[in-house]
Image (cartoon, rainbow, N blue to C red):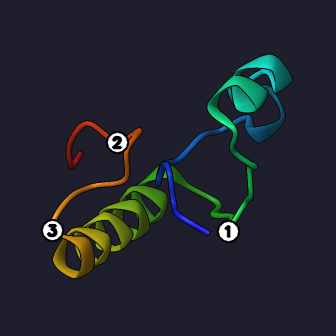
Amino acid sequence: GEIDKIGTTQNPKYRYSLDYLNAQNVDYLTKHQFESRLPAMIAENIELYHYWVENGRLPRLNMNFH
């Protein structure tokens, strides 16, 4: 149930290979869809901030805020 990555992509089908997802032992889920990049980036940062406040760290595959 742990979140491993919070992020955005324009091409979710091609963002991560099935081999990579299996190697990381993760499921890829699309949570939101936006018409433009700006609201997607804002939503990503809000989710990252809330995760950081609740857990004292970012998800394991996130390096920093954008």
Say which residue label 2 marks. Answer: 62
Label 3 crowding class (10 Å Cα cut-off): few <14, some 14-19, many 20+? few
For residue 52, side relative to residue 16 (left or right): left
Q: CA distance from mark 1 to mark 2?
A: 17 Å
Mark 1 — residue? 31
Instruction: Say few, some or many: other residues with alpha carbon within 10 Å of mark 1 (under 14 / 14 to 19 / 20 or more).
Output: few
- Identify the residue at horizontal 37%, vertical 53% (top origin): 59
Residue neighbourhood size for the residue with mark 2, other residues' Cα within 10 Å, grouped as few (<14), some (14–19), many (≥20): few
Q: Earlier in the sequence, mark 1 or mark 2?
A: 1
Kindly identify which residue carries mark 3. 56
Q: Which residue is depicted at the point 77% across and 29% down? A: 22
Residue 14: image location, x then y, percent: 78, 26
Q: Where, by quadrant of the figure, is residue 66 drawn?
A: top left
- For marks 2 and 3, the one nearer the N-term is 3
Give the structural element (helix, strand or loop) at label 1.
Answer: loop
Figure quadrant of the N terminus? bottom right
- Image height check: is 46 above or below 2? below
Give above or below for 14 relative to 62: above
Q: Which residue sits at x=21%, y=49%? A: 65
Residue 17, percent from left and from top: 78, 21
Residue at the image position 69 percent from the left and 44 percent from the top: 26
The one of 66 and 17 positioned closer to us in this rendering: 17
Relative to 10, does residue 40 appear above or below in the rendering?
A: below
| Amino acid marked by disc 1 | Lys
Between residues 37 and 25, which one lies in front from this camera angle?
25
Above or below, 59 relative to 46: above
The image's mark for residue 57 is none
Which numbered disc, 2 or 3, marks the residue closer to the eye? 3
User: Element type at marker 2?
Assistant: loop
Residue type at mark 3: give it: Gly
State the image coordinates of residue 55 (x, y, percent, origin top left). 24, 72
